[in-house]
Amino acid sequence: MTNPAEELLDVVDAQDRVIGTAPRGEVYRRGLTHRCVFVLVRDPQGRIFTHRRTDGKLFAPGAYDCFVGGVVGAGETYASAAVREAEEELGVRGVEPVPLFRFLFEQKRLSWWCDLYEAVWDGPVSPQVEEVAWHAWLTEAELAERLDEWEFVPDGREAYRRYLASR
C-alpha cells in the first residue's frame, strides 16, 4: 500500500475546476482546495453505518463519522470515487451510491468540495482495518445522541446537518 500522503489529488478552485495536482500531504499542509466524496450507507432497516476512524488517519484521527468516503484521486470522477471508497471501507463489492448534492466545506485553513451520496447495503460488512477502528449500524435517533457525545469529523458533521436539512 502506498503512503496516503503521497497520493496525487486534483487541486480545484472555488468553482470546483481543476487547476493543478499535488500529493495529498502537500494539499493538507498548504490548505489547498480538493475533492472528497461522502456516502451515507444505510441497511434495509434504515440504520446508518457509523464508525470511528483509525488513529493513523492524516485528517481527524480517531474521530467518528457517519459517512464512508474520502479524497477523490487525480483524474478520478466523484461517482467512481464514491463507489471505490464505499467498497474499500465497507469491505464489500456492488455498492450503488445515489448522488444527492455537493457543497464546499471550509474551516480554518481547510477547504474541499464534498459530493454526497446515499446507498443501501443489505449484507455483511468487513470494514477496512486501516480506515475503521470500530463500527455499528445506528438509528437516526441513536446517531443524533452520539453527535452530542462523541467527537465527529467536522466535515462529516456538516455534511450530515446539510443532509437532514435537504430532506
Image: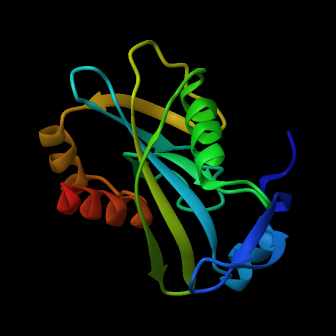
- State which quadrant residue 80 falls in: top right
Q: What x and y, as percent, mark residue 139? A: 19, 33
**What residue do we see at 22% from left, 60% from top?**
166
Q: Residue at x 36, y 61 (%)?
A: 159
Is 138 on the left or on the right of 25, as rendered? left
Q: Nearer the viewer, residue 16 or 63?
A: 16
Q: Is residue 41 left or right of residue 12?
A: left
Query: Residue at 38% across / 16% down in the picture?
Result: 122
Q: Tag count in the figure?
A: 0
The N terminus appears in which quarter of the rendering?
top right
* Residue at the extreme left: 141
- At x 17%, y 40%, the residue is 140
Q: Name the side, left or right, on which 12 lies relative to 69.
A: right
Q: Position of residue 144 (x, y in %)?
A: 17, 49
Front position in the image: 130 or 32: 32
Scheme of colours in the image: rainbow
**Residue at the extreme top of the image, as rendered:** 123
Left or right of 83 in this view: 154: left
Determine whether 38 is above or below 133 in the image.
Answer: below
- Residue 114, position in %: x, y? 49, 64
Q: Position of residue 99 (x, y in %)?
A: 44, 49
Residue 51 in the image: above or below residue 99: above
Q: Picture quarter containing residue 9? A: bottom right
Q: Can you say which quadrant of the picture contains the C terminus? A: bottom left
